[in-house]
Amino acid sequence: AQASAQRVLACSCSTEASLHPPPAMKVVASFLVVALVVLSGTQEVEATFVPCQTQTIFDVIMCKSHMCSDCKLAWCMQTCQKAQEDHSGCRCEDWPEARASFSSGAFKGKGKVGDVGDYSM
């Protein structure tokens, strides 16, 4: 009877030990959970693009036109800035998250027209 009690005690001890992982494993598991939470949060931020009410028109004028993407003439720059005013709150889907409007980005004529060179003060 004493031998079977020792076997039961030995079995319960080994089962109890397998239910509690070593401290190093707990640290690794905690790190992986935190990393997954952080990574899943950044993916959601990057993927959010909310179209404006006039997005289709804005896309044709601003995002897909030569005038607002490749033209270096002053007229193009001024016309695109006016289009941005007419469609305030709109932005192109492929613009970086930090770029909120036409003028805040790096468009072709930026710094080439207006108060630059001999005309700057």
Image (cartoon, rainbow, N blue to C red):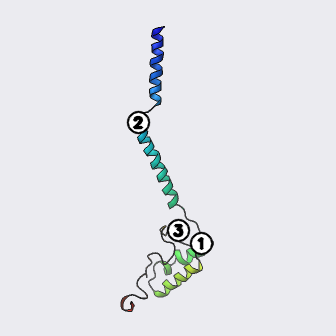
Rendered image: mark on residue 23: 2
Pointers 2 and 3 in contact (C-beta within 8 Å): no
Residue position marked by numbered label 3 in the rendering: 93
Q: Position of residue 16 (x, y in %)?
A: 47, 26
Residue 70 left/right relative to 90? left
Q: Residue placed at 43% from the left, 81% from the top? A: 110
Residue 6: name its quadrant.
top left
* 2 vs 3, front mark: 2
Residue 52 left/right relative to 69? right
Q: Secondary structure at mark 3?
A: loop
Q: Position of residue 7 (x, y in %)?
A: 45, 15
Q: Quadrant of the C terminus?
A: bottom left
Rendered image: mark on residue 55: 1
Residue type (three-letter) at the residue carrying disc 2:
Pro
Q: Secondary structure at mark 2?
A: helix
Question: 108 or 21, which lies in front?
Answer: 21
Disc 2 crowd rating (10 Å Cα; few below 14, some 14-19, many 20+) is few
Given the current orientation, which residue lies at the most extreme top position? 1
